[in-house]
Amino acid sequence: MDKCVRCAYCQVGCPTYEMSFSETLSARGKIRLAQALMDGALEPSPRIAADFSMCLSCLKCADNCPAKIDTVALFQAARADMATARGTSLAQRLILRHILPFPARLNILAKLAGLATVFYDNAPDMLARFFPFSVKGKRRVTPRLLQTNLRALVARGKGHGAPREGALRKVAYFSGCMTDLAYPDTGLNVMRQLEQAGVEVVYPQGQVCCGAPAWFAGDNDTARQLAMKNVEAFADLDVDAIVVSCATCGSVLSHALPMMLEADPRAAAVAGKVVDFQKLLVELGVERKLASIPGKGKLRVTYHDPCHLKRGMGVSAEPRILIKSLPNVEFVEMAGADVCCGGAGAFTLEHPEQSARFGQFKARAAQESGADIVVTSCPSCQLQLADAMSRAGLDTPVMSAADLVAMVMEKS
C-alpha cells in the first residue's frame, strides 16, 4: 500500500471507475480504504464491502501501475479481513465450504440448476422481468448443465484415446468447473487436440475447483482447502506441464496458488508448470500443420482476450496465431479486444445490471468487426459474451478456440 503514489494511472481503463467515476471504485481509492481499515480509521461496513465487491479483477489497474502493485492480491486480502470481521452469508458458506470442494456435490447442484433453467429459459416472456438476473426484462443466457460432465466422460474413456508412440511430452489437464460442468465438449476437444499433436494427456480425477470463487470472496480457509486438494492431485504426477483452457483457473493456479499455500513448496512447483493449451499448441508447431491444409478465407472470426489470460498469464498472440492458421478462416480484430467483458465470475451474479452494461460494448465491437464467430479462451467470458450477443439481438455464435479448431477441421 505504501508504494501507491496516487498517480491515477489505475483509473485509465478501469471498467468500474469509468462506469461510475467514483473514487472508491478505482484502485487507488480502494488502497486508501484498505489502509484506513488496517489503521483502524474505518470499521468494516456494508458500504465498504460493496465497494470492494465492485471489482472485476480484470488486472487493468495492476497492468497500468508504474509501481507494479499487486492490486488484486491487496484487494483479496482486504476482502478476507472483512469476511473475518463481518462473516459471510449462509448461502455463500453453504456453496463455498460444503459444495465447491466436493465435485460430486457440485455436479448434483449443477444438475439441479440445469433443471431450474429449463423453466427459466422456456417460461413466457411476460414473466421474465420477475426472474433473477433479468436486466430490463430480458432473461440471461444460461449454461447447459444437464449434459454429462467432462469428469464422467473421461472416466468412461470418451474422447480420450491412447497417445501416439513416442509422445513429445506428458501433460496433466486441469479443466476447471465451468468446462467440466457446462462445456464438456470443449474439454474433450482440448484433450484430443493435444493428443493429435503427439502429447500424452492425463486427467487427474482428484482435481477440484481452482479456488477462485472462495479466494476472491475472501474465504481463505476454503481457498486453501481447495488448493491443497489440487496440489495433492497434481504434485506427484510425472508431467512436463499442467494444461489449462480456462483463463481464470490458469491465472489463479499460476499466481495465487503459492500465496494460498506459502509454507508448501509443492504449490510453487505446481504453479510453475501451468500453461495455457493454446500456447502449448503453438510451441509444438501445430499452427504450421494447420496452415499447410488448403483453404480460402470464408469464415470471419474475431477474438476476445480474457483478462486473466492476457494480463494474468501473458498469453495473447498464441490464440490469434492458431485462428489465423486455420483453413477457410479470416481473422478480424475487434475494437477493444482486451476490454473486460463484465463476466468476472460471481460479479455477473452480484451485479447483473453493471455486468450487462460491460457486455454491451463487447457485443457492439463484435458486430462492428463483421465477424461470423466470436472466439474466446475462458468459459466465463464465453457465457457472458453469449448473453451480451443475445441482449443485442445478434445470433453470432461464441465458442472457445478448441471448439473452433475442431469445427473447422471437421469441415476441411
Image (spheres, rainbow, N blue to C red):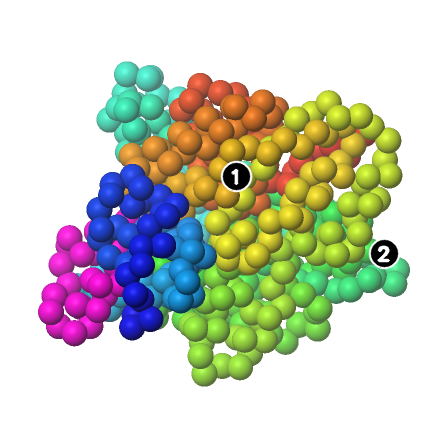
* Residue at screen point 40% across, 67% down: 67
Residue 296 visible to an observer of this rendering: yes
Question: Label 2, label 1: how many angstroms apart (C-alpha)?
Answer: 37 Å
* Residue at screen point 30% across, 28% down: 135
In-image side of 386 versus 13 (left or right): right
Look at mark 1 in the image and give the residue it sits on.
337
Local packing at callout 1 (Cα closer than 10 Å; few below 14, some 14-19, many 20+) is: some
* Residue at screen point 80% across, 25% down: 296
The numbered dot on residue 164 is 2
* Residue at screen point 42% across, 52% down: 60
Residue nearer the viewer, 281 or 35: 35
In-image side of 214 versus 191 (left or right): left
The numbered dot on residue 181 is none
Q: Is residue 395 above or below residue 40?
A: above
Q: Quadrant of residue 376?
A: top right
Estimate the x, y position of residue 109 in percent, counting from the top left: 40, 47
